[in-house]
Image (spheres, helix red, strand yellow):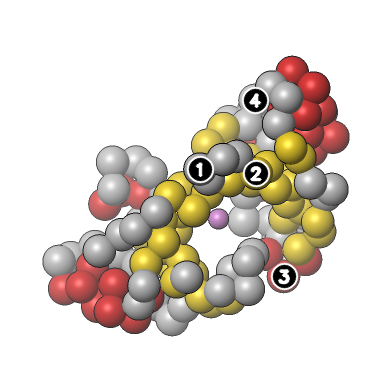
C-alpha cells in the first residue's frame, strides 16, 4: 500500500543553524525558509536525490512541534512521510486493522498542498507516520 518515502521531517530549535549544518557541513541543497502559519511551522526543504528532508522550526504559540522540542532539546526526527495513491482507501484499511488515525480521520491539506493524514506513533514502533496522497 505505501509507496515511496516522501520525506523525513526533523524538528529543530534554530532553523538558521540547522540550515547551515545541512548546507555547509553536509553539502546539501537547502531551500529558503518557508513560513507555514496554518501548520505552525517554518520549513526548510532539503532535496536529496531519492527523497527530501524537511527541517521544521516552531512558528507561533500553538506549534504542533513545541512539545516535541521540550522533550527533545537537541531536536530530532519528528515524523516520516510515505506516499499513497488513495488516502481514503489507506485510512479505511488502516482503521480496519485497528491503527489509530490522528484527528477526526479527515485528510487535511499538508505542507505540499496535498491531502495528508497522521498515524498514531504508538501503533507504529514509536514513529509518527504521515501519509500523503500523491
Ligand atoms: Co511532513
Distance between the alpha carbons at the discs numbered 1 and 3: 28 Å
Give the image location of residue 5, x and y in percent. Answer: 43, 50
Q: Residues within 10 Å of mark 4 (few under 14, many from 20)?
A: few
Residue at screen point 71% across, 60% down? 40
Q: Ligand 1 falls in which quarter?
A: bottom right
Of circles 4 and 2, the one toward us is 2
Distance between the alpha carbons at the discs numbered 3 and 4: 25 Å
Q: Residues within 10 Å of mark 2 (few under 14, many from 20)?
A: some
Which residue is labeled 3 in the image?
Answer: 38
Name the quadrant containing residue 3.
bottom left
CB-based contact (under 8 Å), mark 1 and mark 2: no
Which residue is labeled 2 in the image?
Answer: 47
Earlier along the polypeptide chain: callout 1 or callout 4?
1
Secondary element type, mark 2:
strand
Q: Residues within 10 Å of mark 1 (few under 14, many from 20)?
A: few
Earlier along the polypeptide chain: callout 3 or callout 4?
3
Give the image location of residue 79, x and y in percent. Answer: 49, 47
Earlier along the polypeptide chain: callout 1 or callout 3?
3
Q: Residue furthest top?
A: 25
Which residue is labeled 4 in the image?
Answer: 74
Name the quadrant containing residue 75.
top right
Which residue is labeled 1 in the image?
Answer: 50
Earlier along the polypeptide chain: callout 4 or callout 2?
2
Secondary element type, mark 1:
loop
Amino acid at each position: 500500500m505505501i509507496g515511496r518515502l516522501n520525506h523525513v521531517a526533523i524538528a529543530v530549535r534554530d532553523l538558521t543553524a540547522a540550515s547551515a549544518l545541512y548546507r555547509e557541513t553536509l553539502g546539501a541543497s537547502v531551500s529558503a525558509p518557508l513560513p507555514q502559519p496554518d501548520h505552525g511551522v517554518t520549513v526548510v526543504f532539503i532535496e536529496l536525490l531519492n527523497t527530501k528532508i524537511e527541517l521544521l522550526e516552531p512558528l507561533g504559540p500553538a506549534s504542533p512541534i513545541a512539545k516535541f522540542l521540550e522533550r527533545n532539546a537537541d531536536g530530532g526526527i519528528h515524523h516520516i512521510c510515505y506516499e499513497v495513491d488513495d488516502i481514503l482507501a489507506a485510512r479505511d484499511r488502516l482503521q480496519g486493522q485497528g491503527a489509530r488515525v490522528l484527528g477526526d480521520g479527515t485528510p487535511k491539506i499538508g505542507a505540499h498542498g496535498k491531502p495528508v493524514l497522521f498515524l498514531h506513533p504508538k501503533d507504529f514502533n514509536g514513529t509518527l507516520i504521515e501519509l500523503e496522497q500523491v
